[in-house]
């Protein structure tokens, strides 16, 4: 299966689960609102507000993380709206453990999909830095370009430390730190 086909299948599954879970969640919130005295149109307004706020807050959380802004309030609101949707589904269920579990499935499936989709972030490898100072890279620069670079000045008697300091381990590779130490 090609990557493009796999992406299309994943998108189709995402849309199918999202549509079914959204329909179930909307219906449960609507029915609960109407059962507790709200007019029909307010029941739908409540359903739209609760379910779309969950999606919006997930997107906002991702955007804030990407830009390094605080996520506390947005994360708390996301949990609150997700619990509200889940509570509406469970409240409409048959009063048994299995009734509650089955009623919670659409909301939990949708939340899991939102989490998976929103947690996909492009991975960018760290920039590779040379171990050699620029003064010793003169030959590399001359070979890589047609124009000969200006020759760097190298001290007449370079001072070489007797013991080299240990090399710093990149912090974004914690699995390697345990192996090196």
Image: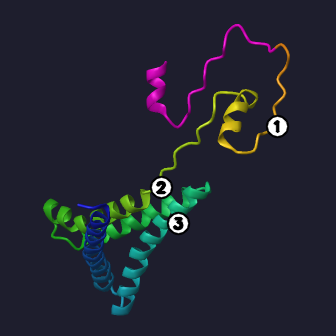
Give residue 58's mark.
none
Which SS does the magenta portion mostly show?
Answer: loop
The residue that appears at 42% across and 68% down in the rendered structure is: 81
Query: Residue 71 appears at what percent x and percent y?
Result: 56, 57
Per the model, the C-alpha gap separating discs 1 and 3 is 50 Å
Can you say whether 168 is above or below 73 in the image?
Answer: above
Instruction: Give the mark toward the camera: 1 or 3.
Output: 1
Of residue 76 and residue 35, the one placed in the foreground of this image is: 76
The residue that appears at 38% across and 65% down in the rendered structure is: 82
Instruction: Give the mark toward the camera: 1 or 2.
Output: 1
Query: Residue 132 appears at what percent x and percent y?
Result: 67, 27
Q: Earlier in the sequence, mark 1 or mark 3?
A: 3
Residue 171 colored magenta?
Answer: yes
The residue that appears at 43% across and 61% down in the rendered structure is: 118
Magenta residues span 158-181
Residue 168 colored magenta?
Answer: yes
Residue topped by disc 1:
150
Q: CB of mark 1 within 8 Å of CB of mark 2? A: no
Residue topped by disc 3:
60
Q: Earlier in the sequence, mark 2 or mark 3?
A: 3
Q: CB of mark 1 within 8 Å of CB of mark 3? A: no
Query: Residue 114 appears at what percent x and percent y?
Result: 37, 64
Of residue 8 and residue 117, the one placed in the foreground of this image is: 8
Residue at far top of view: 162
SS of the residue at dot 1?
A: loop
Residue topped by disc 2:
122
């Amino acid at each position: 299966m090609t990557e493009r086909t796999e992406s299309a299948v994943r998108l189709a599954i995402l849309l199918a689960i999202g549509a079914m879970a959204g329909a179930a969640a909307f219906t449960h919130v609507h029915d609960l609102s109407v059962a507790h005295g709200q007019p029909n149109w307010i029941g739908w307004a409540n359903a739209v507000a609760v379910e779309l706020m969950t999606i919006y807050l997930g997107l906002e959380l991702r955007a804030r993380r990407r830009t390094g802004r605080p996520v506390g309030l947005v994360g708390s609101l996301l949990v609150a709206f997700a619990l509200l949707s889940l509570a509406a589904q469970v409240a409409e269920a048959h009063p048994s453990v299995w009734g509650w579990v089955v009623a919670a499935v659409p909301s939990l499936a949708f939340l899991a999909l939102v989490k998976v989709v929103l947690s996909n972030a492009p991975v960018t490898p760290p920039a590779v830095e040379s171990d050699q100072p620029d003064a010793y890279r003169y030959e590399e620069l001359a070979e890589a370009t047609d124009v000969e670079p200006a020759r760097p000045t190298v001290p007449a008697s370079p001072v070489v430390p007797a013991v080299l300091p240990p090399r710093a381990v990149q912090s974004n590779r914690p699995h390697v730190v345990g192996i090196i130490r």
